[in-house]
Image: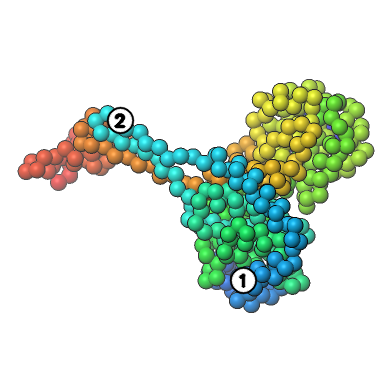
Amino acid sequence: MQVLNWDKQTQKKIARDFSHHFDTKIFKKVTRILSEVRSRGDLAVRRYTRQFDGIDLPLKRIAVSESDINRAFEKIQVKFVPILRQITSNVKEYYERELKSSFELRGKNGVYLAKRYLPLERVGVYIPGGQAPLVSTVYMSVIPAKVAGVKEIILCTPPNRDTGDVDPHILAVANLLGVKKIFRVGGAQAIGAMAFGTRTIPKVDKIAGPGNPYVTEAKRQVYGFVDVDMVAGPSEVAIIADSSANLDYVTCDLLAQAEHSGGIPYLITNSKKVIEAIRKRVETGFIIQVKSLHEACEVANAIAPEHLEILTEEPEKLLKYICHAGAIFLGPYSPAVIGDYIAGPSHVLPTGGTARYFSPLSASSFIKSSQVISYTKEALSKVREYVQQLTEMEGLFLHRISMEARFVEKGQDKKVKVRDRSLE
């Protein structure tokens, strides 16, 4: 691991090297893929599946069938289902507590204000395939959407290069969670299909789930056509450790993070003993040496990591100094892996410093709101003068006339004067 002292040069390095980068080549490739998917639909999806996943799927095989689901259940271990039930219970319990409630406000003279929270109608979930199909991402993404009340969830995941099948555990979990539409499509073409819609794959309102740099860039480009959960990058963990930290725990947690493709482990410590031990055990990543644990929190906030472990003598005391992190794990028996699989909160987290402004995936990620405003004529008359002044200040005279029209009596001259301007 590369050892860095916490100074202005390291701060600049973090801002420059440890955050998301714009790759012109990926941008151009993804732009071309999305443009073709938008114009040619399923044909483009099939073409890019053949090109990138190495398998030519007939259009009728893009959608996973009921017989595919049945075969998936035959392939998985029986004990997997009760394990899933326990995990599902943990995740549901966590998210049911965070849902926002609609509210009403009634003011004087008949003013009525309200806010209505409503679930999105259709959501697309992307599940990476590759060497390590992320089965856990299925329930970590689908359950928050189900708790929010989303009516329809569709799922896209890449097909196996040899068989064209989808990992049976992904299919089983999705089916048990009530996902009815699953498609053998991966990469930027899957994001484009969900964003624009094809004859086979429905257009969604929001896309959630992690992916490779092409998936990430595709999500960035389709934002606005649909909503996206976040623009995520390589997985990362930062560990704040003092001299009391168990070196085996620190080592294992750093190595676990490096197991992800492109995963980045950071160790932040004020202990030379920890530095000397870990740099011999772990090759990949960065060690940032600090003068104090307070400075360690400053470093963590600068990195704004996806996962932050605090392995110090009194981890709870540092929590109040942490402002930017996707998920925070306190103490020696709270490894990041517990958040990956079973604790409850979703493991779909902001990466690459985006925890400064993105939040973890949650039930509220699948909720939108509408504002309700109702005034009586008496209530409107009370604010009439204020609106007049503001519309004149902004020079939006038709806005003022929209207000004044409410106070023109029947049979009265319908010319509404606004200084030197008037409309008949």
Residue 256: quarter of image: top right
Residue 54 is tagged as none
Q: Is residue 203 visible?
A: yes
- Residue drawn at 61 percent across, 41 percent down: 94
For label 1, count other residues whose C-alpha is less than 10 Å away and answer few (under 14), some (14-19) or many (20+): few
Q: Which residue is mark 1?
A: 66
Of residue 84 and residue 191, the one placed in the foreground of this image is 84
Q: How many numbered discs sit on the rendered protein?
A: 2
The amino acid type found where label 2 is placed reads Gly
Residue 222: quarter of image: bottom right
Of residue 187 and residue 177, the one placed in the foreground of this image is 177
**96 sits left or right of 326 in the view:** left
Q: Position of residue 316 (x, y in %)?
A: 71, 26
The secondary element bearing badge 1 is classed as: helix
Residue 111 to residue 203: above or below: above
**337 sits left or right of 358 in the view:** right
**409 sits left or right of 306 in the view:** left
Q: Position of residue 107 (x, y in %)?
A: 30, 30
Point out the image quarter for the N terminus: top right
Q: Position of residue 8 (x, y in %)?
A: 75, 28
Q: Position of residue 248 (x, y in %)?
A: 88, 37
Q: Which residue is mark 2?
A: 107
Name which of mark 2 and mark 1 comes first in the sequence. 1
The amino acid type found where label 1 is placed reads Glu
